[in-house]
Amino acid sequence: MLKILIPVDGSTHALLAVHHALRLVGSGLKARFVVANVQEAANLYELVVAHDPAVLQQVSDAAGRDLVRPAMALLSAAGQQVEALVVSGDPAQVLAELVESQGCDSVFMSTRGGGLRAAVLGSVSQDMVQRSPVPVTLVKVPEDAQPD
């Protein structure tokens, strides 16, 4: 059974990769899924101002859990095996590391995120094509799609 990593950033565009995966499952694909969100690492200012760095980590983890929830709900509702991961760091680097540490066979991701994240997720998807040790399927956002 394939293990597929699906990175999400909370945008509806990112969920296109989940819908693509579910279409393939509907056509007979046997897979289990890892839905991942990469949070930016705290910057120096945040670390200096924070009285407790553990609080920054808790806030980051909580934000990430909220962002993976819609994708988790779609996959779970379809009866798929799915786990969620929230990590922090450079997105493409961390995602490539997750592919290896989680034993993933493939990555499904949107070509771009939504709103301000559009350019960032787009560059992450291009970075993943270069860095990933496994095939990356890019799910194109329709030309007429409204930004999140």
Image (cartoon, grey):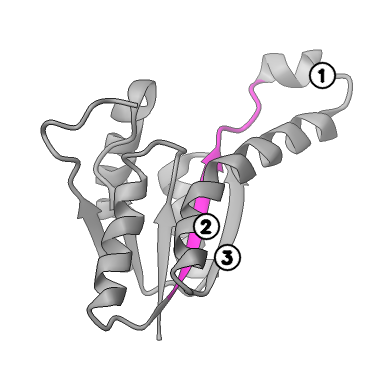
Q: Earlier in the sequence, mark 1 or mark 2?
A: 1
User: In the figure, 101 relative to 138: above or below?
Assistant: below
* Amino acid carrying mark 2 in the image: Met
Residue positioned 56% across, 49% down in the render: 69
Question: Which range is magenta?
Answer: 32-43
- Which numbered disc covers residue 72? 2
Residue 130 located left or right of residue 8:
left
Can you say which quadrant of the picture contains the C terminus? top left
Residue under numbered circle 3: 83
Q: Earlier in the sequence, mark 2 or mark 3?
A: 2
Q: Please provide percent x and percent y for residue 100.
A: 47, 68
* Amino acid carrying mark 1 in the image: Ala
Count residues near mark 2 (Cα–Cα under 10 Å), then give few for <14, some for 14-19, many for 20+: many
Q: Please provide percent x and percent y for residue 88.
A: 59, 42
Residue under numbered circle 1: 50
Residue 122 lies in the magenta-colored region: no
- The residue closer to the viewer here, 28 or 46, is 28
Residue positioned 45% across, 39% down in the render: 9
Can you say which quadrant of the picture contains the N terminus? bottom left
Q: Earlier in the sequence, mark 1 or mark 3?
A: 1
